[in-house]
Image (spheres, rainbow, N blue to C red):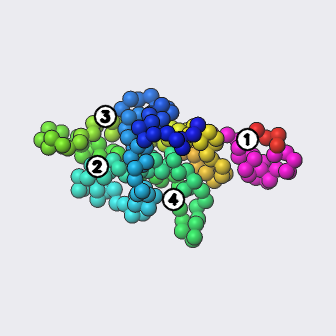
Amino acid sequence: MSIMNISRTGLRDLFSENLAVKDADVHNHLVDLLDRQVDTTESPISKYCPDSVNITNLFSQGAIDELVRIGDYFCFLCGFFPEHFTGRKKKGIMRLGMGFYIEKGAEAYNYALSITIEQRGRPYSPDEKRIKPSLLSKLSDSIADNARAILMLRRNLLGREPVYNFSTMKEVRANLKYSPDLSSLLVKNGNYLNQEPLPAGHLKIVK
């Protein structure tokens, strides 16, 4: 599936058609999330690194939108950029595993839910967006499933398996319950049991 010549509106439709999420509210929320990412150059990896975000402080400030944004970004990061979790060290810096992001994303949604429930009944300005408590609860409960759906969407858009690294494979299996195509891993990395490269003559028969 190629997205090179698709229109901006068509791209959103493509997201909607290929995102395997049954709940209509969650599906629409994730399509909005993916749609926003098309129009932004902001990196969720750099801005919303768990080391730099104190979710508890945002909760005390009543920052619902920011908490939801963090939950969304962590979900998107785990689903669309699983390579971020490849290896635990890069340039001497320890990386946090995918499970930490899933946990913190769910926590951010839960804090947003708590504030929303506390603020029930207060007047809203006409242009203020409201997010339903029921949706926040669903997003928290299904963050790993939603990240897996985004990863499968990426696979469909690429037309091939996006997970090619053993460390990444372990992360997505453990945290997203996603099983990569092992034939792709064999070609890229060799025998997945002993991680030894396959002989060149064997590559052509691995499909």
Q: Is residue 141 left or right of residue 155?
A: left
Count neighbours of disc 3 (C-alpha within 10 A) and say few if under 14, some if 14 to 19, many if 20 or more.
few
Residue at 44% across, 61% down:
46
Report the residue at 38% width, 40% height from top.
32
How far across and how far down the image is residue 9, in percent? Answer: 41, 38
Of 183 and 196, the residue lying toward us:
183
Label 4, residues with CA under 10 Å away: few <14, some 14-19, many ≥20:
some
Q: Which one is in front, 34 or 164?
A: 34
* Element type where label 4 sits in the image: loop
Mark 2: give few (<14), some (14-19) or many (20+) Cα within 10 Å.
Answer: some
Mark 3: amino acid: Ser
Residue receiving disc 3: 134
Q: CA distance from mark 2 to mark 4?
A: 24 Å
Q: Amino acid at mark 4?
A: Leu
Q: Identify the disc placed on residue 65.
A: 2
Mark nearer the N terminus (1 vs 4): 4
Q: CA distance from mark 1 to mark 4?
A: 28 Å
Q: Nearer the viewer, mark 2 or mark 4?
A: 2
Q: Amino acid at mark 2?
A: Asp
Name the amino acid, label 1.
Ser
Label 1 to label 2, Cα distance in Å?
A: 42 Å
The reply to whether discs 3 and 1 touch (Cβ–Cβ < 8 Å) is no
Write down the region rendered in magenta. 176-203
Which one is earlier in the sequence, the residue at label 2 or at label 4? Answer: 2
| Magenta span includes 24 | no
Q: Which mark is residue 183?
A: 1
Work out whether 88 lies above or below 77: below
**Which sits in the foreground, 150 or 117?**
150
Please say whether residue 176 is visible from this viewpoint.
no
For the C terminus, the image quarter is: top right
SS for callout 2: helix
Tag 1, which secondary structure? helix
